Amino acid sequence: MTPGGPAQPGTVPTGGPQIPGMLPLEESYVENILRLNRGKLATVYMTFENNPEWNAKVFKGIIEAAGRDHLILSDPQTGMRYLLLMVNLDYVTFEEEIEYEYPFGAAPGMASYSPR
């Protein structure tokens, strides 16, 4: 952003200190983290209120895409693709390290997180 002027196209104003290996606060949204991990196998835990057949459901698949309100998974065993709504998302697990840092403006290589 330029002082006293409008924001430049394609820029995101930053409101705090940048911590190496961490997404800036404005970019640390679930859909962005899922996009960074596109192509990885994930287990997605979801709950569906007022559903008499199943209240909670687990989906396992490859992350194909993620948007502000949805996630697309593909099951490598069945070929089934799922369009899942973020409003039902509880949490996601991965069996490998996850990417968390955007490649633009970052140090060489992308940071990943592993709870070891």
Image (tube, rainbow, N blue to C red):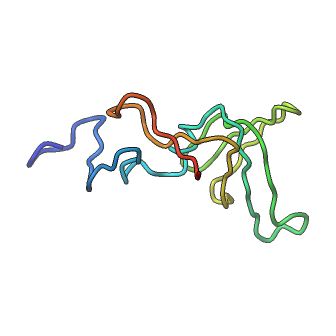
Q: For the N terminus, give its image quadrant.
A: top left
Q: Residue furthest right?
A: 53
Q: Residue at x 21, y 43 (%)?
A: 7
Q: Residue at x 65, y 44 (%)?
A: 71
Q: Residue at x 80, y 54 (%)?
A: 58
Decide if residue 51 is on the left or right side of residue 31: right
Q: Position of residue 70 (x, y in %)?
A: 63, 47
Decide if residue 116 is on the left or right side of residue 4: right
Decide if residue 43 is on the left or right side of residue 100: right
Q: Residue at x 56, y 43 (%)?
A: 67
- Corner quadrant of residue 37: top right
- Corner quadrant of residue 38: top right
Q: Residue furthest left?
A: 4
Q: Position of residue 104 (x, y in %)?
A: 36, 31
Q: Position of residue 30 (x, y in %)?
A: 54, 51
Q: How many marks?
A: 0
Q: Residue furthest bottom?
A: 50
Q: Residue furthest top?
A: 108
Task: Give the camera-side residue of 103 and 88.
Answer: 103
- Corner quadrant of residue 48: bottom right
Task: Give the camera-side residue of 87 and 35.
Answer: 35
Task: Give the camera-side residue of 77 and 51.
Answer: 77
Q: Position of residue 65 (x, y in %)?
A: 62, 36
Residue 3 lies, with reference to residue 35, above or below; the image says below
Residue 97 lies, with reference to residue 105, above or below; the image says below
Residue 82 lies, with reference to residue 104, above or below; the image says below
Decide if residue 4 is on the left or right side of residue 53: left
